[in-house]
Amino acid sequence: MKNNRPRHVARTAVALVMVAAGSAALGGELGEGAVRNPYDIEKPKGAGTGPEVHVAVGGSDSADGTPAHPLKTLAAAILKVKPGGTIVMHAGKYPGAVINQGYGTKKAWVTLRSAPGERVILQGNPRGDQYATLYFYHSTCDEYAPPGSVCASSYWRVEDLTIRGPKNGGADSNAVKIDTQHVQIANSVLCCAVPDVVKIVRTANRAAVLDSEIYSDPSIVQPGSNSQGVDITGADQVRIVGNHFHDLPDVALYAKGNSREPIFARNRIHHTGFGANDSYNAIMLGQQTDENRLVDGPYESYDGLVVNNIITDVAGACLAASSSLNPKFFHNTCVDTAQRAHSAMLISTEGGIAYTPNKGVQMVNNLISQSSKRPRILNNTDRDYTKPTEAPLSIKQNLYWGAGAATKFVWIPDFYNERGFDAWKSSYASQYGEVDTSIVGDPLLDDAFAPSSGSPAIGAALPGYALVDYEGRTRSTLAPTIGAIEATSVRVDGRPAK
């Protein structure tokens, strides 16, 4: 299925704030003891304070890199750029590079961007198709680095580029691969790789992918069977915010492998997971990593947050927690998901060390609207691995709808076949001593996936789980709307708007 929307629409990042409840403290660059802000994006300090280095198709790598005498390749510009400097690429198609030098500093980031109004495409790596087009690498970040090595920080921000994976690449030929710390990709088009479009590995702490388009297109590069949008394996404090994912054969976005404090917020995910031989999910906290790579604890992810995402037309689950500790899913909107497998919300035990069960799952204030053909809301896979999800388990104040058909649930070991909402609530109360206070009803969504007047979602959410919505509007402080978009018919004080 071809998505006919424009390939990239630049958006302005919204400064979003989350309540302190349930948050963890961060130290380091945010300040010791600072309250965790789920939408806090590291500011590239000192970016643009150094000289520019220009690159043009007709340039020469023996030139000085000025606008009048540009370089020819990105690789040459990396050798010349200084902390705080900017590499400006002019219109054309270029090979990418391995970025293992030319780094910025904590107070002087390097910027790589296109010249204003000019389209730049990076594809392929001059070192060979086995490399990612844009590969942030340092020997101290290699998984075979000597014990005690401290992974280098790149302090790079990439903006306004189209980046594609090598056409004939293999397992590591991503569009972007990040091994080093402090790398941001923003306002870019990331497309078309045999493996994952973006790969963020264990050592790539504080990476961010922001306001970008991420998709597959077989006419450019034929994706492999497990080509995912963004795959995070073990990195901490990664931020994936404001992106548009679509037409991916596998999972759009997930964090696994001991990843800590990942945040997936304000993303739009559409038509994904329809691999040729299987069905895949949209967003996952956790999944399955080889046990020998789980070197930092038994869980796949820790303290992850998924908030204010809009997810439509998915083969598998919309929201999934797998072998993770304290995964949180708040104020997401899921429409017509789980078309082939699972349910809109999936709780699975398939990863961790010796199949570690989830613990502390929270699914609150999510809007789930399924088709009448598959009105499945929630299921688990605990039967397969005999380790049920551990308390606390908080599933409440969601809105469930099956397009007029009765909503369906599967909760193992109590029942293996689809049952109704009452059966789920009884099982939930029996196993966890909790009450699912969710609502069943037509959300009355408009074309932008916002609840229309009269929707039972309006004013029905628990307050305090997200202070702003998908559009960046302030939520009602007393009676917010269930789902990603706050209804405009309710004022901030919780009263109906006039």
Image: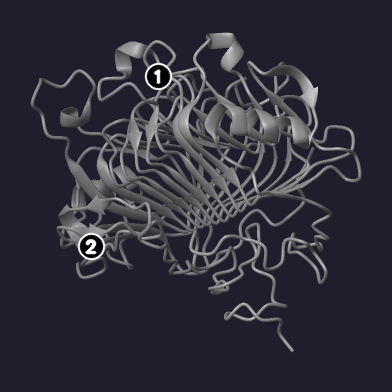
Residue 497 position within the rendered picture, expressed as x and y whole percent measured from the top left: 71, 84
| Above or below: residue 338 compared with residue 90 | above
At a point 61% along the width and 57% down the height, the residue shown is 8
As drawn, the residue found furthest toward the bottom would be 498
Residue 40 position within the rendered picture, expressed as x and y whole percent measured from the top left: 35, 60
In the image, 493 versus 470, the foreground residue is 493
Q: Amino acid at mark 1?
A: Gly
In the image, 121 versus 400, the foreground residue is 400
The residue that label 1 is drawn on is 352
Residue 294 seen in the current view: yes
Q: In the rendered structure, which disc, 1 or 2, sits on the residue that comes first in sequence? A: 2
In the figure, residue 339 lies in which quadrant?
top right
At a point 72% along the width and 78% down the height, the residue shown is 489
Q: Residues within 10 Å of mark 1 (few under 14, many from 20)?
A: many
Q: Amino acid at mark 2?
A: Gly
**Colour basis:** one colour
The answer to whether residue 346 is left or right of residue 264 is: right
In the image, 206 versus 99, the foreground residue is 206
At a point 46% along the width and 31% down the height, the residue shown is 391
The answer to whether residue 156 is left or right of residue 209 is: left
| Above or below: residue 479 compared with residue 1 | below
In the figure, residue 473 lies in which quadrant?
bottom right
| Above or below: residue 131 compared with residue 26 | above
Quarter that holds the C terminus: bottom right
Residue 371 position within the rendered picture, expressed as x and y whole percent measured from the top left: 85, 40
The residue that label 2 is drawn on is 85
At a point 61% along the width and 62% down the height, the residue shown is 9
Residue 164 position within the rendered picture, expressed as x and y whole percent measured from the top left: 52, 39
